[in-house]
Image (cartoon, rainbow, N blue to C red):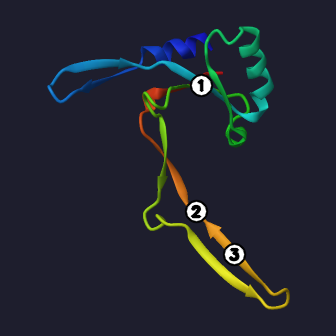
Amino acid sequence: LGAAMKTLSQQAKTTTDDTGFKAKILYRPHALVVPQSLAVTAGTVLESMGNRLNLELVVDGRLDSNSETAWYVAADPNQAPALAVVKLKGSEEPDLRTKKDFERGAMIFRVRVVRGVAVVDPRAIVKSVP
């Protein structure tokens, strides 16, 4: 965990303001992202340290399907978003469909929202190396 936090802290991006001044922005570790299979272990580790690392624990069960042992340290998304949820071309609006059910005197609704995930800044997230 310490090595991942150090790696993330050493990542940087350069930004330029309106006057042409260039500044280097260092990424600050913000969240420990783990699959459901590591939720208890990660919680115990953070708790045992009194969360001196000041990390937010994010548990996402969808990560289990890829790896039950990989975890991530992510930068503050307000400072450097690693990922973004995006609308897919042709699916910008929700897909709403209705159907009348005469037997029950009801209306059936189906709403589908299609989204994707895009990498915004790959330097803003570090994956563990088992």
Occupied quadrant, residue 10? top left
Residue 82 screen position, x and y as percent: 47, 34
| Labelled pair 1, 2 in contact (Cβ < 8 Å) | no
Residue 29 screen position, x and y as percent: 53, 19
Helix, strand or loop at disc 3? strand
Q: CA distance from mark 3 to mark 1?
A: 37 Å
Q: Counting residues from the N terminus, which is met first, the one under dot 3 or under dot 1?
A: 1
Q: CA distance from mark 1 to mark 2?
A: 27 Å
The residue where tag 1 is placed is 31
| Labelled pair 3, 1 in contact (Cβ < 8 Å) | no
Label 3 environment density (alpha carbons within 10 Å; few <14, some 14–19, many ≥20): few
Of all residues, the one furthest to the left in this rendering is 19
Q: What is the number of the mark on residue 109?
A: 3
- Which of discs 3 and 2 lies nearer the camera? The answer is 3
Helix, strand or loop at disc 2? loop
Of all residues, the one furthest to the right in this rendering is 104
The residue where tag 2 is placed is 113
On screen, residue 46 above or below 69: above
